[in-house]
Amino acid sequence: MELHEGASNEDRKPIKGIFSTQEVKQVDTGTGVRKSVQKTFWFVEEVDGKVEVQPLNSNYIPAGKKRFITVEDVIRRFQPEPEFYVSTVFPKMQELADTVDRADAHRSSGENFTAEFEYGNALQVDEENVRANFGLGLTYLDRGETSKANNIFERLVKLDAAFETKHKHLFNEFGISLRKNKMTKQALEYYDRALELSGGDDHLFYNIARAHFEKKDYAKCVDFLLKAVNSNPDFEVVLKFFVWLLDKGLVPEERLSEVRTVVRSAEIVAKRKEAVAEAVGDGIQLEQRSADESTPVVEKVIDDDDDDLLLQ
């Protein structure tokens, strides 16, 4: 792609492709000094006005830490390599994606050993591939191999990319699987890392509450449930959980008043909605959330088989 100093943002397409930089180094040979030119290839992509660069690994796959630079930096320091992208990098990226797709398909079919093999092939090409690491970790957790799963956890918790929004489904599934395999300490460390990088939302607060519940730390469990319901007052799973905790006498005394107020308020709102629904009759349908935005509902909020708590 051609870039020019005078081009405005309106006159050009967003930057995306392979670029290179060159660095001249002086090497001491023992008998003198000679110059050496080191060429580095980068995957460069402009999203929402920000330019993100990531180096290529030895297998010509974008890997490693990403960083942001300015368009001016790209123009001044980076050389476009369109032929290299088309002939080498893009085919390698597509081959890697196909390998991970096959692994995911095998895992979905319960073929865990074949999935492990395919994920391993992907990680040989890019050891930091987020989808492959999540998939391999989930494969180990499905088999109850917590020691191997812990190795993957140690890798994932250091990868900032694992906590990006586009991986939210895998993030949630992996965190819940850690908890269900009694790896509560790891689950909480994992969720703390998500809070550090991206802040919290109602589903993350809820999953943290579930992990504290497993540790029988009911005070922290209630604290995070309150954060979840404050973020999303219609979070029905949390409201059911509060009712269960109240019935079992597990709400700490200093939180009893607040929890009871939340539950009573939710009951009042629910009754009002029922009254409105009856008043308007069958001819008018109240606005509802779309399927993608709906919150899962559970009958037993602490059942170990609560797969419908895999929040997205």
Image: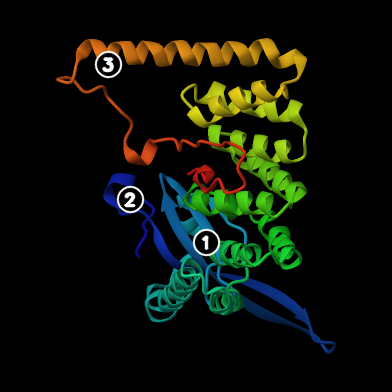
Label at residue 277: 3
Instruction: Answer few, some or many: residues within 10 Å of disc 3's Cα (few below 14, many 20 plus, some between 14 and 19).
Output: some
Which amino acid lies under the numbered mark 3 shown in the image of this protein?
Ala
Label 1 to label 2, Cα distance in Å? 16 Å
Residue 77 shown left or right of residue 285 in the figure: right
Name the disc covering residue 7, or none: 2
Q: Nearer the viewer, mark 1 or mark 3?
A: 3
SS at mark 1 in the image: helix
- On the image, the x and y values in percent for residue 35 come to 68, 80
User: Which label sits on residue 77?
Assistant: 1
Looking at the picture, tell me which residue is in the foreground, 206 or 240.
240
Describe the element under mark 2 as helix, strand or loop.
loop
Q: Residue furthest right?
A: 30
Query: Taking 105 as reference, is 117 left or right?
Result: right
Q: Is residue 199 visible?
A: no
Q: Earlier in the sequence, mark 2 or mark 3?
A: 2
Q: Secondary structure at mark 3?
A: helix
Residue drawn at point x = 38 percent, y = 73 percent: 82
Q: Using the image, determine if residue 101 lies above or below residue 243.
A: below
State whether residue 26 is above or below residue 258.
below
Whole-percent x and y of residue 258? Answer: 64, 12
Instruction: Please state which of residues 234 and 3 is positioned toward the viewer in this rendering.
Output: 234
Amino acid carrying label 1: it is Arg
Q: In the rendering, at what x and y percent does residue 291 appear?
A: 33, 40
| Crowd around label 2: few <14 · some 14–19 · many ≥20 (10 Å) | few
